[in-house]
Image (cartoon, grey):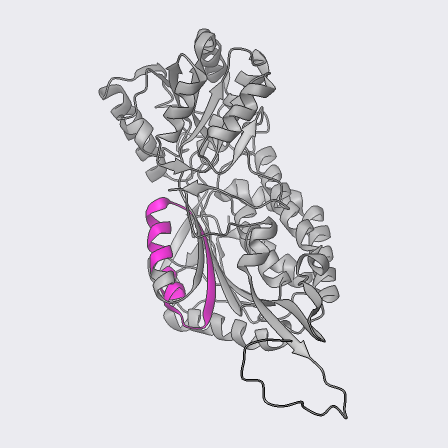
Amino acid sequence: MSIREIPMYIDGQAVPSQSQEWRDVINPATQEVVARVPFCTAEEVDRAVASAKEAFKTWRKTPLAKRMRIMLTLQALIREHTEELAALITEEHGKTLPDAAGEVGRGLEVVEHACSITSLQLGELAENAANEVDVYTLNQPLGVGAGITAFNFPIMLPCFMFPLAIATGNTFVLKPSEQDPSSTMRLVELAHEAGVPAGVLNVVHGGPDVANQICDHPDIKALSFIGSTNVGTHIYRRASEAGKRVQSMMGAKNHCVVMPDANRSQAINNLLGSAFGAAGQRCMANSVVVLVGEANQWLDDIVEGARSMKVGPGTQRDADLGPLVSPAAKERVERLIAAGEKEGARLLVDGRGYQVEGYPNGNFVGATVFADVKPEMSIYREEIFGPVLCVVSVDTLDEAIAFINANPNGNGTSIFTNSGWVARRFETDIDVGQVGINVPIPVPVAYFSFTGSRASKLGDLGPNGKQAIQFWTQTKTVTARWFEPENVSSGINSTISLS
């Protein structure tokens, strides 16, 4: 099997890196090397930023309608190439093909939303705000934007960033995860096929050194990050200190509340899909279920469902979950499972040591369920990012809300109930940015903003929706009065009055 070398993308072309440092990209189901990715040099990053800076001079003045038509073409190309993109995701990330195709669909939603840029970027006007004075606002692009994405959604996360950034007139430098870059690179190729001009969208690769250079670079005006809390906090602080506008979407510990009046089968099936889909490698996965009152009697059904979850390579379409992304990820998840046992949680389903026939080297961990989980335990305090479900038992809705609000994270939460009063009480009192009511993964549609909160987010504005338009533009307010050609001034006005 030939091993492809991942290029950079600079000034509208795939460019081979001259770096001396390369990393292998591994198929997590087989441990085969499928690609090699460079850790770009500082000069190469500078070159990408310079290309974006130069392209901004003309791209910012490109008519909105032309930008819209490029987005319309891009969404058609993504739709046409969904299976190809999904296959690349599965090969390097490991998630199942249906899940990968679903990811492409969620990224596509953002591009579809960007097709409305002719109305999304409108300003405001007040005619005759004072005597023959009009006041209006312009929503103008910032300049060069940048994005740093995590491995778990190599199509969706870049789509959370560059489509709206460039649709609003900015240019962009993207650093995808070095663990699974091929699908991202194909997405960028499709963007250029759609008509994105040279220099408007560039790609560099690397690790901390490249990320820090992006944070520090004086020509980058705004930075979007999605990834772990430790890295996201560092990125936010460093880039903010360098004067950039920053949004940093970070870690989570999401809870799903199950009320005794919920539809039993629907609640359990949705919970299992949320907890174990993508092998738990989702920042919006519900990794903690809070069973309220008589719903505690459903624990056996949850255990039975977890045991029925089928593990296999992502290419096996009837598999429920594929491998973890790397041997290091598998080791970490199994270490935390061991810690859960040691700290006193009751291990009901153990996914360690899972073997898949024909794939002896895969990073497989089966669905795992703990009961009697307490807040001080490692499996509750840490974001496991694997197929591990923690079960917490409480007596009342009040206890459930208090338990969730005591957690420092605020990315997402869900409740399953048939009571409108309970649902409304939950959405009002819960201190979490994104709430699902009988929806297990409450990632909003693309024309609403991604609104994680508390320790899960740094920065006032999130990706997607109206907030993304605000993030990628700056508001300029113009106060204008036009005099008649023969108008004679009535004298000097030394006040601040506009009358």
Kindly tell me whether residue 319 is visible in this rendering: no
From which residue to which does the magenta span run?
211-237
Q: Which residue is located at x 46 percent, y 74 percent?
A: 47
Q: Is residue 40 left or right of residue 337?
A: right
Q: Is residue 306 above or below residue 175?
A: above
Depth check, front residue: 54 or 361: 54
Q: Which residue is located at x 41 percent, y 69 percent?
A: 18
Q: Is residue 269 left or right of residue 387?
A: right
Residue 103 placement (x, y as % from top left): 58, 40
Q: Which residue is located at x 34 percent, y 60 percent?
A: 238
Depth check, front residue: 262 or 200: 262
Q: Is residue 150 above or below residue 192?
A: above
Q: Residue furthest front?
A: 490
Residue 413 placement (x, y as % from top left): 48, 30
Residue 166 placement (x, y as % from top left): 60, 63
> Residue 362 appears in which quarter of the rendering?
top left
Q: Which residue is located at x 71 percent, y 65 percent?
A: 64
Q: Is residue 227 above or below residue 373?
A: below
Quarter holding the C terminus? bottom right
Depth check, front residue: 101 or 288: 288
> Residue 196 appears in which quarter of the rendering?
bottom right
